[in-house]
């Protein structure tokens, strides 16, 4: 249960942390309690940051936070961490690797069991952060091996981060990431080989901006920020940010329904008699039909 006297209280970091913790454990409850606080139009510039593991996404985000902050912007970061199959818990590598950030900034990790999708808890957290009044929200999503297209559904613009010495990953980039990004960032420009990668990426993307930075040594970040602002102002003109918010709300609804449905389906499947399912496969169509009826009833009863 959360009770806010007014939605402005989300601007208080302690309150915001509490709400985000609840968004992590029970996003549906946050939606029930706080949907009236959610923004009615684009407020924050939401920047998705994706790319293979180790290219420097977290480092770029913490450097961008500092730069944007000293430019007078309020910045929040949402770091989506994959669940480790080995430990069974979130790696939370992003949180550990996020260096000290300024007082007025806010960073938060959420875990995701599926590398290709953003769970309801992540989308809800993003909505809450936007309601809290941040100017920029930077969302890190893992893109290792896979192209994380879900980040497209929630961001105003997407940075695809690359670095020198990517080897086989370059094939992946060619295969899918080239449609995903609005801006391509070649990080680790302090390494001489970055020049080669920069030329290569430029030849691949042609009409999209490619920016070379060194996040670790804070080089060229202003150029990156200017590029972000240029892309955002273009999208504002084209009403694309409003369309993005609509996409995000639909995605939120889709995830809310899918997650509930999946939970209910698994509950129902527990009930099935193992020997029966194995020894009489001819009942499968009938079993699925029966399951549908029971699910429909249960869903209507609702939580
Ligand atoms: N040389 C160099 N190393 C960097 C730079 N940016 C990040 N790194 C290093 O690259 C490693 C991975 O960075 P991280 O931000 O965790 O990558 P992520 O997995 O994409 O989030 C860390 O050891 C960073 O210190 C850079 O600009 N130059
Ligand atoms: Mg990271």
Image (cartoon, grey):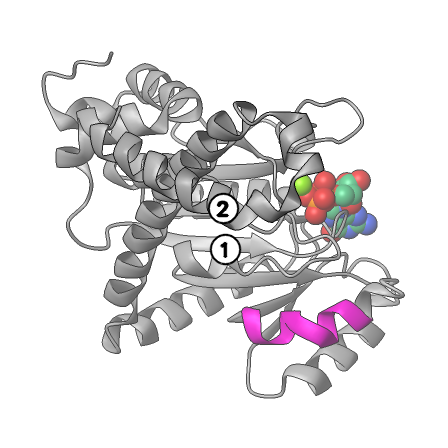
Q: Which residue is drawn at 24% across and 38% down?
A: 131
In the rendered view of the protein, which quadrant contains the N terminus? top left
The residue carrying mark 2 has its beta carbon less than 8 Å from ligand 2 = no
**Cα distance in 3D space between marks 2 and 1:** 8 Å
Q: Residue at x 37, y 22 (%)?
A: 26
Q: Which residue is drawn at 55% across and 38% down?
A: 79
Q: Is residue 107 visible?
A: no
Residue 207, relative to residue 198: is it above or below? below
Tag in front: 2 or 1: 1
Front residue (pair 53, 260): 260
Name the residue beneath numbered marker 1: 151
Residue 260, relative to residue 41: is it above or below? above
| Secondary structure category for the residue under label 2 | strand
Front residue (pair 151, 214): 151
Pinpoint residue 39: horizontal percent, then vertical percent: 19, 45
The quarter of the displayed image where residue 228 is located = bottom left
Characterize the magenta stretch by its predominant secondary structure.
helix
Tell me where the magenta segment starts and ends, as one range: 171-180
Residue 69, relative to residue 198: is it above or below? above
Pinpoint residue 266: horizontal percent, then vertical percent: 52, 30
Q: Can residue 49 be seen in this view?
A: yes
Q: Is residue 196 left or right of residue 300?
A: right
The quarter of the displayed image where residue 259 is located = top left
Q: Is residue 178 magenta?
A: yes
Q: How crowded is mark 1: few (under 14 residues within 10 Å), some or many (20 or more)?
A: many
Name the residue beneath numbered marker 2: 139
């Amino acid at each position: 249960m959360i009770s806010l006297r007014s939605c402005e209280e989300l601007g208080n970091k302690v309150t915001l942390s509490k709400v985000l913790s609840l968004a992590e454990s029970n996003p549906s409850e946050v939606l029930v309690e706080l949907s009236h606080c959610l923004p009615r139009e684009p407020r924050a510039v939401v920047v998705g940051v994706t790319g293979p593991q180790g290219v420097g996404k977290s480092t770029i985000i913490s450097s961008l936070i500092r730069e944007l902050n000293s430019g007078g912007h309020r910045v929040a970061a949402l770091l989506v961490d994959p669940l480790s199959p080995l430990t069974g818990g979130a790696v939370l590598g992003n949180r550990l690797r996020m260096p000290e950030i300024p007082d007025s900034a806010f960073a938060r990790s959420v875990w995701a069991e599926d590398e290709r999708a953003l769970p309801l808890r992540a989308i809800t957290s993003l909505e809450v952060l936007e309601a809290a009044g941040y100017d920029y929200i930077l969302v890190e999503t893992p893109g290792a091996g896979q192209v994380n297209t879900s980040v497209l559904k929630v961001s105003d613009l997407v940075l695809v981060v690359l670095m020198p010495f990517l080897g086989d990953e370059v094939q992946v980039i060619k295969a899918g990431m080239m449609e995903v990004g609005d801006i391509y960032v070649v990080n680790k420009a302090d390494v001489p080989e970055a020049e080669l990668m920069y030329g290569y990426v430029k030849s691949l993307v042609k009409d999209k901006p490619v920016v070379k930075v060194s996040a670790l040594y804070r080089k060229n970040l202003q150029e990156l920020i200017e590029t972000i602002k240029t892309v955002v102002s273009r999208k504002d003109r084209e009403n694309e940010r409003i369309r993005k918010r609509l996409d995000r709300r639909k995605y939120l609804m889709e995830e809310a329904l899918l997650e509930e449905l999946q939970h209910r389906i698994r509950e129902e499947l527990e009930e099935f008699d193992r020997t029966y399912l194995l020894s009489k496969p001819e009942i499968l169509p009938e079993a699925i039909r029966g399951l549908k009826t029971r699910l429909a009833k249960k869903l209507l009863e609702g939580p």
